[in-house]
Image (tube, rainbow, N blue to C red):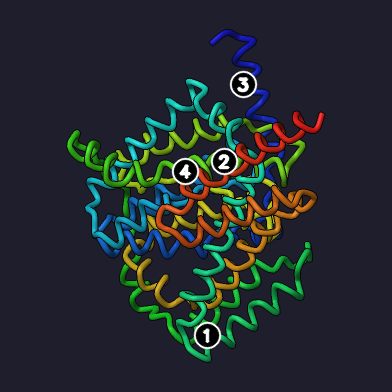
């Protein structure tokens, strides 16, 4: 690296770090994605007996790195399709590691060859809005149908209190709602559910374990897990995240190639230290933003929590997750969902674009492999309607 190039890189890094803040709003925003992350992570750990210390430490480190690299509240998330397949079909940790490495290589190739730019320009904005809307519907359904009813009438009461806190403190920069809601749930758990004996007996320093994926696990993981995940990653993790960044931070220029590159590099690295495959995601970005985060500080705070849990309390993580009131997480998840769904507003000027976006969202929610089916159906309808309009204009002239 030449002297001028080195100074340029140092200048960019210094500029990003200067934009990172640690304050009440970043602390509040740091909990904006916990409702989706924790259940998926714990589900994989408990179902296929993954090493909890390695999973939490690597997941937290990727958050910290992403927050520092982008200087924006863009967290990493578990790969959702992979997580669901691992949990429901009990696919082993070795295959999961191989799948993470495989999809990381594919995404890095697409980024470096310009394939992502071609895919992005091919997909209309209304279809991207539909994908965002569909993800919002999925998160809202998860919150209302699975998280909210878990504690009966007590849970409904907790959710009502949590929602009242969010409503009363919305846009309050002195007392941000996200941190207050999580503190509320933590106090309830500490008073009624936490076994402090379990926590104290489980405390102790634990480090990640080295793991080298075998070739047969990489091939199997690619076929069984990476291929079902790839359409969702291209739409939600890369394209929709790029659009959400432009929506929320129009002054920041973050290219789709950069998002795909960090996605690829993370997944090439984490399998060797026992981590789970991860991605960027417009839902996590929207969740952090909705609860007040505006810089990478929220992501760094969020990641530090996972690193500490993995290093010191990995043996007690399952207990802590199980006793935290799920209806409180439902409220956090529901706010994240609303933030995503409201992005549809800029399509309202066109009945055609609004209809396509709504159709894509409903397909994404309701049919198997809904995100890729919705993507293909939305693009087909958009381009066919554009052709019909073009032919109609030609005949009338």
According to the image, label 2 marks what residue? Answer: 379
Please state if 48 lies on the left or on the right of 258 as rendered: left
According to the image, label 3 marks what residue? Answer: 9
- Residues at badges 3 and 1 in contact (C-beta under 8 Å)? no
| Label 3, label 4: how far apart the Cα atoms are | 29 Å
Is residue 212 in view?
Answer: no
Who is closer to the viewer here, 66 or 78?
78
According to the image, label 4 marks what residue? Answer: 233
| Label 2, label 4: how far apart the Cα atoms are | 17 Å
Q: Earlier in the sequence, mark 1 or mark 2?
A: 1
- Of badges 1 and 2, the one in the foreground is 2
Classify mark 4: residues with Cα within 10 Å, few (<14), some (14-19) or many (20+): many
Q: Residue at x 80, y 50 (%)?
A: 349
Is residue 289 in view?
Answer: yes
Who is closer to the viewer here, 278 or 373?
373
Please state if 72 lies on the left or on the right of 217 as rendered: right
| Label 2, label 3: how far apart the Cα atoms are | 39 Å
| Label 3, label 1: how far apart the Cα atoms are | 50 Å
Q: Secondary structure at mark 1?
A: helix
- Residues at badges 1 and 2 in contact (C-beta under 8 Å)? no
Q: Which mark is residue 155?
A: 1
Vertical relation: 205 (above or below) 151: above
Q: What is the residue that sits farthest to the right in this orientation?
A: 397
Q: What is the residue that sits farthest to the bottom in this orientation?
A: 153
| Label 4, label 1: how far apart the Cα atoms are | 33 Å
Q: Secondary structure at mark 4?
A: helix
Q: Secondary structure at mark 3?
A: helix
């Amino acid at each position: 690296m030449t002297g001028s190039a080195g100074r340029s890189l140092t200048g960019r890094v210094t500029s990003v770090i200067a934009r990172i803040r640690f304050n009440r709003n970043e602390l509040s925003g740091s909990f904006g994605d916990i409702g989706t992350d924790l259940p998926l992570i714990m589900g994989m750990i408990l179902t296929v007996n993954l090493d909890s210390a390695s999973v939490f430490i690597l997941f937290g480190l990727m958050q910290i790195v992403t927050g520092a690299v982008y200087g924006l509240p863009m967290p990493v998330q578990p790969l959702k399709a992979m997580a669901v397949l691992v949990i429901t079909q009990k696919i082993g940790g070795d295959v999961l590691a191989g799948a993470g490495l495989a999809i990381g290589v594919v995404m890095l190739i697409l980024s470096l060859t310009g394939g992502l730019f071609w895919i992005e320009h091919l997909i209309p904005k209304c279809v991207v809005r539909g994908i965002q809307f569909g993800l919002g519907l999925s998160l809202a359904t998860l919150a209302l149908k699975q998280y909210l009813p878990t504690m009966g009438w007590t849970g409904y009461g907790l959710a009502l209190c949590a929602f009242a806190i969010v409503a009363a403190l919305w846009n309050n920069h002195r007392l941000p709602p996200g941190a207050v809601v999580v503190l509320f749930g933590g106090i309830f758990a500490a008073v009624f559910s936490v076994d402090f004996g379990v926590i104290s007996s489980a405390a102790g320093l634990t480090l990640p374990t080295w793991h080298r994926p075998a070739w047969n696990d990489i091939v199997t993981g690619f076929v069984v897990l990476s291929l079902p995940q790839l359409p969702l990653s291209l739409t939600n993790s890369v394209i929709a995240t790029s659009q959400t960044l432009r929506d929320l931070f129009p002054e920041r220029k973050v290219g789709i190639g950069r998002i795909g590159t960090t996605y690829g590099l993370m997944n090439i690295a984490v399998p060797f230290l026992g981590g789970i495959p991860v991605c960027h995601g417009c839902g996590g970005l929207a969740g952090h933003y909705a609860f007040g985060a505006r810089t990478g500080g929220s992501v760094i705070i969020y990641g530090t929590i996972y690193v500490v849990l993995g290093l010191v309390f990995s043996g007690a993580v399952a207990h802590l997750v199980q006793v935290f009131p799920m209806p409180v997480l439902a409220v956090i998840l529901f706010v994240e969902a609303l933030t995503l769904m409201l992005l549809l507003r800029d399509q309202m000027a066109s009945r055609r674009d609004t209809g396509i976006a709504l159709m894509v969202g409903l397909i994404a929610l309701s049919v198997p492999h809904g995100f890729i089916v919705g993507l293909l159906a939305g693009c087909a309808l958009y381009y066919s309607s554009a052709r019909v309009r073009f032919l109609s204009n030609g005949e009338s002239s």
